Image (tube, grey):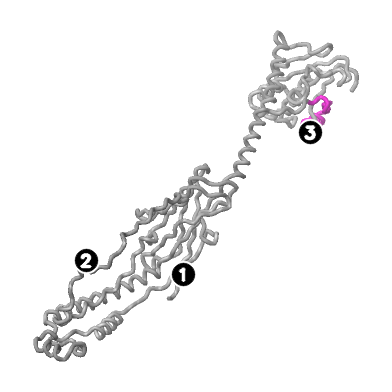
Amino acid sequence: MSQSNKTVFLDTNVFLHYNPFDQIGWLDLLDSPKATIVFPPVTIRELNKQKELHPRKHIRERATRTLKKLSNLFGSNNWGSVSPNVEAYLEDREPSVDFADHGLQKEVQDDNLIASILSFQARNPEADAVLVTSDEGLTLIAKARRFQIVVLTLTDDHKLPEETDQDQKRVRELEDEVRLLKANKPVLSLTFEDGNDYTSFPIAAPVEKQSSYFDTQVEELKQKYPKWQKGTPTPGKESTLASEAMSAILRSGLAVIPDKDIDEYNLGLDQFIDSYRTFLEKEVSRENMQRRTIELKIYLTNDGTSPAEDIDIRMHFEDGCTLYKTNDLPIRPVPPTPPEKPKPEFMKMFERPLYVRDLPLSRPPYYPTAISQPPRNVSSLRIQKSKSFDVEGHVKHLKHNMREALDPFYVVFDSYDCAVSFNIACRILADNIPLAVEQKLNIVIAKGES
């Protein structure tokens, strides 16, 4: 640069990232005996903007300090002294150049600064203007060169050291804490025994029993248990008594079964046969229910890196089925027993009540002392019926990389046609997980013949 008086325009980044403008040796940098720093309106606007809106606190503070200095510098007029032979001038006029003709845009800060320099040169053609910018202002430098404006780039030895913004530091600390919490948390899910969230079950076709099947079973039962005829003596009993005693019994009529006992027995047989037919129908119905029943064994799994506490589990089932716990499943029908065969009068004579004195002596009953058991970690499932079914459970504690088996329960489809693939909507909520875990368990039904 020639040793003439220089007029200096500063890019806003110089105020924010370099030494304060009043502490820079401008005369040595510009190789000039005298210098004037011009502060156009765009510079003041940008400093005010950075004071209010910059995300880093220390940058906001630098803009605030600069504006305070300028306020003191230009307190009485638009001229002020920065240092010996270095003056400052506050330009209160917006640039008068035609932005469009010069390929500039008013809304662009760099373009406003270039326009301010061009307006100053137009008013002061003999002035030696210099644009001072940082090493990051490549676009601004390129525009200045287009208009043959001299550019001075400040070196790093004028740059301020990077400050650790306390707000930014706290944000980073919080981000680190969040990352740590995300990395160190339970990861809960419901799975089947093989660890997957899907499984399949075969469903056999129902058994179809025709009426003839029940008729055949009833006829076989009638052959096995024929009705008795009246006046029939007890068969095979003569050899058990002395001939004289038997003769006396036969003469007395005590060896003959009374008609009323035979009538009662035959009536009991009819009731037994009818009950057995009902039993057979119930057996078929029960078998068909078993064919459309599936047993669900579901596990709560923690694949995370920390234990889960106080875990509530909810599973929702749609219509078309009924849910049972193990102890609530319908019991198998009990086959009826045939009536006891009638006995002749003489045999009844040998029967008598059993009195207390005939009972063998025994020790007093022993009642074992109940042993207290620790509370279960997994509660029993609760099955609630509304329009559909909801299953609820609770697990107190689950370590990471572990799983707990919930009580098994059973899904009984309402019919063979209702037995279709479905999914279970699941919701898991733990005391140390902020958000509920939502997932689905998928069940595939494969229908086939028995």
Q: Residue at image x 45%, y 73%?
A: 448
Relative depth, front residue between 6 and 164: 164
Residue 182 locus on image (x, y percent): 60, 43
Q: Amino acid at mark 2?
A: Val
Tell me how far mark 3 sits from mark 1, CA to CA.
72 Å
Tell me how far mark 1 sits from mark 2, CA to CA.
57 Å
Identity of the residue furthest to the left in this view:
252
Q: Amino acid at mark 1?
A: Pro
Residue 134 locus on image (x, y percent): 79, 28
Quadrant in which the N terminus is drawn: top right
Mark 3, Cα crowd under 10 Å, few <14 / some 14-19 / many 20+, is few
SS of the residue under disc 3: helix
Res 104 seen here: yes
* Marked residue nearer the N-terminal end (3 or 1): 3
**Magenta span of residues:** 139-159
Q: Residue beneath label 3, please?
A: 138
Q: Residue beneath label 2, please?
A: 356
Q: Is residue 106 magenta?
A: no
Q: Residue beneath label 1, please?
A: 202
